[in-house]
Image: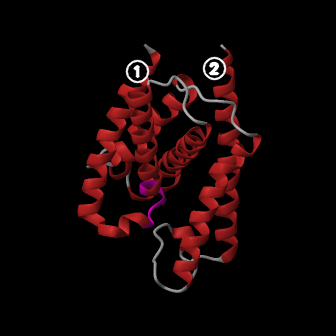
Amino acid sequence: MIIKKVCALHIILLFLELIARIHDMQVFGLRMLTYYTIDSNILQMVVSAATVYLIMTKKDQMVPAGLAVLHLICAVSLTITFLIALFVLAPQEGFAYYFLWNVAPINHLIGPLISIITFLFMEKSPTLPKAAVFAPMGATILYGIIALILNGVRLLDGPYFFLRVYETPSGTIILWFCIIAILCMALSALYLGIRKRCSKA
């Protein structure tokens, strides 16, 4: 029964993500790929599609370790987007814009919630390597470095204020990188710990 619920939630999430991506493509075009939030949701689409495919074709109760690590990256990244939207961006530009308008609820609330619930409490996988705890931070730092380089050569503007190298002091950029890296590590360790306890239970 639990595997059917996992499949159903991933199908729901995949459907919602497709709606959001169609909207984002219409609004931003390929520029949507410059947003950490959208990139995280796109990766979640891939993870959900792969999970549904495996469940429906192999009827397997276990998610492969590699796919589970990708889901960990999604769960942490989507949590980061929720926290930054809630505590940093929304107070500046309005909570409605980040949590109520258009597909914002999918990107910043519903997507993260379903991703976290399925990863922590429902999916089962082989024991993940200890190095998995570093995967979300590595993926996030990689995005940040690429975005900084593109901002540096003026091929990209932002899309977040702490990536605008010509407008933001270097100390502020470094501070935000450190904050986000620490958040990634803390959330990754927390999620892996909860998942391990739930799997034992």
**Amino acid type, mark 2:** Cys
Crowd tier of the residue under label 1, counting other residues whose Cα lies within 10 Å: few below 14, some 14–19, many 20 or above:
few
Magenta highlight: main SS:
helix
Q: How many marks?
A: 2
Residue at horizontal 39%, vertical 36%? 53
Position of residue 60 relative to residue 184, above or below, is: above
Q: Which residue is mark 1?
A: 5
Badge 2, how many Cα within 10 Å: few under 14, some, many 20+?
some
Residue 182 or residue 66, whichever sits in front: 66
Task: Check the picture and name the quadrant holding the N terminus.
Answer: top left
Q: Start and end of the magenta stretch?
A: 34-38
Is residue 34 placed above or below 138 in the rendered structure?
below
| Residue 8 horizontal/vertical position (percent) | 35, 26
Looking at the image, tell me whether mark 2 or mark 1 is earlier in sequence order.
Answer: 1
Q: Position of residue 174 (x, y in %)?
A: 69, 68
Residue 185 point in image, percent of width and height: 70, 47
In this rendering, would 156 be left or right of 17?
Answer: right
**Quick check: can you spot residue 141?**
yes
Pick whichever, 123 or 108, lies toward us.
123
Question: What residue is shown at x 45% (from left), y 57% (from top)?
Answer: 39
In the displayed structure, would residue 120 be above or below residue 39? above
In the image, taking residue 192 as reference, residue 25 lies left or right, namely: left
Residue in the foreground of this view, choosing between 10 and 90? 10
Q: What residue lies at 60% left-to-right and 57% top-to-bottom?
A: 140
- SS for callout 1: helix
Query: In this image, 56 relative to 119: left or right?
Result: left
Q: Is residue 192 magenta?
A: no
